[in-house]
Amino acid sequence: CYYDSELEKQIIREQEIEKELHLAETDPADGGLYLQYQPILDLRTNRICEFEALARLNSNSLGLVPPMEFIPIAERSKLIIPLGYKIFRQAFQFLNKLKENGYGKIRVSVNVSILQLLTRDFCENLLGMIREMQISPDRVGIEITESIFSSNYTEINNILVTLKKAGLYISIDDFGTGYSSLARESELNVDYLKVDKYFTDRMLANPGKSIVADIISMAYKLDHCTIAEGVESREQVRYLKEYGCDKIQGYIISRPLDEKDAIEFLKKHDKSFAKVT
Ligand code: C2E
Ligand code: CA
Ligand code: CA
C-alpha cells in the first residue's frame, strides 16, 4: 500500500511538471522557465570568460523544480525541442545584455539535449536565431553530454562540423562518465572537454592516481581545452593549475546566478580572482 501511494504521488508530480512545461511552451513569457548563469574562470588570465546557462523551472504549485527532474520529463514528452529554442532565446537576450554592459567578449554556453540536436533543421534554426538576434556566433557555445556519442556518431559529428564552421564552440559535458573511445575522441569536432565533478571530487584523495591530470594531458594532445566542473576548494584550484587545466567552474567562483546578479558579479569581482587562484 505504501509503495502504491508513493508511486501515485510520483506520477501525479510528474504530470504536474509536464503541465508546467506545456505552459512554458505556450506562454510568450515562457511561464516558469528561466535561466541562471554560472561563471567560468580562465585560469591563465584570472578573468571570467564565460557563463554556462542552466535551466530552472519555477512552478506555482510545486515551487522550484530541479533540472535533473524536469529535463528528463521534457525529453520524454518531446517538449525539450520547443523549450530548447526558448532557452537559446533567453541565453541570447542575456548575451545582448552583457554586451550593453560592456562585456561584449564574454561567451555563454547552453546545454543541448540530443533529441533537439538531432531534429531536422536544428542548425538552420539555431543559426537563423543567432542572425536574427544579432549575436556574434563565436560567443555561443553548446554543451552535449559524452554519453550521446554511443549512437548516431557520424550524424552528430556532422552537425558539430556545421556549427563549428559557423563559429560556435562545442563542449563535451560530463567527460569521463559516458561512452567514449580514444580513437573517436580524436575525430570529434569539439573545442572543450568538461571534466565531470565526479573526478574533481576525487582528485585530491589520491593525487598520484587521479585521472584528472591524464584527461588534461590527453585533451591537450588532441587539441581540446579543459574545463573542470564542480570546483569547490582552493586545493583543487592549485592542483588543476599545476596540471595545466584551462578553465574552472564551481562554487569556489560562484553558484549559478540570476541574470542581474551575474552582471553585478562581473562588475564587482572580475578583477579579484587572484585571491582564489
Ligand atoms: P551540468 O551541465 O553538468 O551542470 C552542472 C551542474 O553542477 C549544475 O547543476 C550546477 O549548478 C552544478 N554545480 C556547479 N558547480 C558546482 C559545485 O561546485 N558544487 C556542486 N555540488 N554542484 C555544482 P544543475 O543546475 O542542477 O543542472 C543539472 C543538470 O541539468 C546539468 O548538468 C544539465 O545536464 C541539465 N541541464 C541544466 N540546464 C539544462 C538545459 O538548459 N538543457 C538541457 N538539455 N539540460 C540542462
Ligand atoms: Ca553542462
Ligand atoms: Ca557537467
Image (cartoon, grey):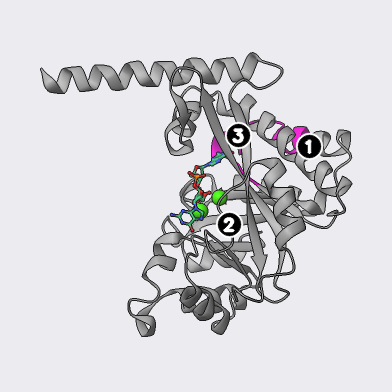
Q: Which mark is residue 141?
A: none
Looking at the image, is mark 3 or mark 1 earlier in the sequence?
1
Residue bounds of the magenta highlight:
110-126
Residue underneath mark 3: 116
Quadrant assignment, res 14: top left
- Contact between marks 3 and 2 (CB within 8 A): the answer is no
Amino acid tagged 3: Gln
Q: What is the C-alpha distance between the residues marked 3 and 2?
A: 29 Å
Instruction: Kindly report which numbered mark, 3 or 2, lies closer to the viewer in this rendering.
Output: 2
Mark 3 surroundings within 10 Å by alpha-carbon count, few (fewer than 14), some (14 through 19), many (20 or more): some
Q: Amino acid at mark 1?
A: Gln
Indicate which disc, 2 or 1, sits on the residue closer to the N terminus: 1
Residue 49, percent across and down? 73, 62
**Number of residues whose C-alpha sits closer than 10 Å to that of mark 2, classed few (under 14), some (14–19) or many (20 or more):** some
Examine the structure image and report whether residue 223 is included in the region drawn in magenta. Answer: no
Q: State the mark number for residue 254.
A: 2
Give me the residue at 75% from left, 54% from top: 107
Q: Position of residue 162 (x, y in %)?
A: 75, 48
Say which quadrant the N terminus sits in.
top left
Magenta stretch encompasses residue 116: yes
Q: Position of residue 34 (x, y in %)?
A: 62, 32
The residue carrying mark 1 is 93
